[in-house]
Image (cartoon, rainbow, N blue to C red):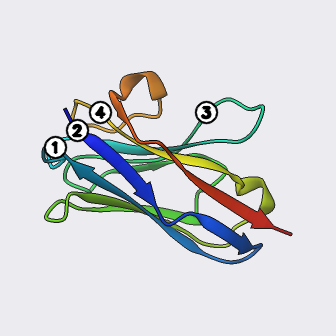
Amino acid sequence: QVQLVESGGGLVQAGGSLRLSCAASGRTLSGNAVGWFRQAPGKAREFVAGIGWRGSITYYGDSVKGRFSISRDNAKNTVYLQMNSLKPEDTAVYYCAADSNPWATRFKDDYDYWGQGTQVTVSS
């Protein structure tokens, strides 16, 4: 069993940046793909970014390409989401999730472990 804890959310003005962290405990994440998802009020949970177990393969949702960057530090058992050029429409609760497989996917049903989420609010 692995526990995931997100941190780094907060309130930021449009155009600003935040870096989210997803720290794992219970066991190592080094063999697992990890994804970031987000959910705004009244909307479905949306894929944001995913990273394979080595960190060399990454995927991004269309709405965040070129602005967000996912990375991982397996020695620290942590995955990061660097968010730049934030927009009000990025406002959501952001969740990290770990897949039992090493290859990242865009589909939330493929992920087995989820954190509790961290709120990101972007003001205009």
The residue labelled by disc 1 is 26
**Which quadrant of the view contains residue 103?**
top left
The residue labelled by disc 2 is 2
Q: How many marks?
A: 4
> Where residue 1 sits: x, y (%)?
19, 32
Compute the Cα span from label 1 to label 3.
Answer: 25 Å
Q: Residue furthest right?
A: 124
Q: Identity of the amino acid at label 4?
A: Asp
Q: Secondary structure at mark 3?
A: loop
Instruction: Report if the CB atoms under discs 1 and 3 are less than 8 Å apart.
Output: no
Q: Secondary structure at mark 2?
A: loop
N-terminal label among 2 and 1: 2
Q: Identity of the amino acid at label 2?
A: Val
| 104, above or below 83, in the image | above
Label 3 or label 2, whichever lies nearer to me, is: 2
* Mark drawn on residue 99: 4
User: What residue do we see at 34% from left, 39% from top?
Assistant: 104
The residue labelled by disc 3 is 45
Q: Residues within 10 Å of mark 2 (few under 14, many from 20)?
A: some
**Which quadrant of the view contains residue 97?**
top left
